[in-house]
Image: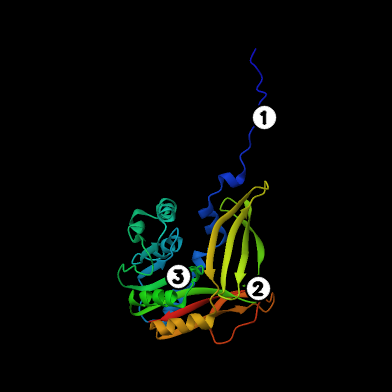
Amino acid sequence: MSKKNTHPSVKTELAELADRHLLYQQSVQDVESEIGFVEQTWSELRRRPATRLREDFCGTANTSCEWVSRGADHYAIGVDLDPEVLAWGSLHNLAQLTQEQSGRVELLQANVLHARPGLVDIILAMNFSYYLFLKRGELREYFENALDGLVADGILFLDAYGGFEAPMVLTEPRECRDTQGQAFTYIWDQASFNPIDSGMTCHIHFEFPDGSRLDKAFSYHWRLWTLPEIREILYAAGFAKVDIYWEGTDEDSNEGNGIYTPSERGDADPGWVCYIVAQA
């Protein structure tokens, strides 16, 4: 007679199985809309096609892969300091491309302050990544290096966020679903803010239906830059024209409509996200 197994089964928590990079892509990034905005804005400002794009602070190079997938003449360079995240992007995102497409993506482990991988039409610094520069001189140095990396009519695209809730200590949960339709909760945690230097610490946590959590999946120590500061530093770095692209409002829902246009006046919302378009 076989002996009955009396040991309790061990159930693996969803947080232990989770991939933080994949969760980030599914909850934070919208590369289709982002590249859609870049392509549309470029076509409105320039009479020639853009082919070469540099993604600074590229992380998993998700945006670079979206760029090359949209045109047979599209090339991308992803620049990031972290070898682990670059390796993840190569294994998971570049691997989803065709061999020909992946051959048009170059991943470069380097400091964006000093990287000189060759001239490109477009440089992206999205997801507020440049907020990691805490001093005005550092941010100007980055913008100067970006300008040096652009062709004569190149464009630097940035995003920015703010609003009267931006410097507050708070947490904001948002329900999400992964590509298989499984639910999870993305939690944005503004853990601290120093009004003297505008320095802040933020975290991203993930929570799962079984109650398990992936705490501090990502942590950021950055400066909450204002739009006037960013524009002034871009002009000081040598950019010829800097426009703020503000999101319009849907009349029925009174929420953002996803359409960004050049604006000189924004709404005093509790939280907003906009694009900054700096022309060389």
**CB under 8 Å between callouts 2 and 1?**
no
User: Could you tell me residue 52's position as x and y percent?
Assistant: 35, 70
Which residue is at the front of the view, 125 or 234? 234
Residue 44 seen in this snapshot:
no
N-terminal label among 1 and 3: 1
Which of pointers 2 and 3 indicates the residue nearer the eye?
2
User: What kind of residue is marked 3?
Assistant: Ala
Residue carrying label 2: 165
Give the Cα distance between marks 2 and 1: 47 Å
Position of residue 132 relative to residue 137, above or below, is above
Residue 5 seen in this snapshot:
yes
Disc marking residue 94: none
User: What kind of residue is marked 1?
Assistant: Pro
Give the Cα distance between marks 2 and 3: 23 Å
Residue carrying label 3: 125
Q: Residue furthest left?
A: 118
Disc marking residue 8: 1
Which of pointers 2 and 1 indicates the residue nearer the eye?
2
Q: Residue furthest front?
A: 196
Query: What is the secondary structure assignment of the residue under circle 3?
Result: strand
Residue at the (53%, 63%) spot, across then down: 220
Position of residue 222 relative to residue 4, above or below, is below
User: Could you tell me residue 244's position as x and y percent?
Assistant: 51, 82
Q: Which quadrant of the structure image shows residue 101? A: bottom left
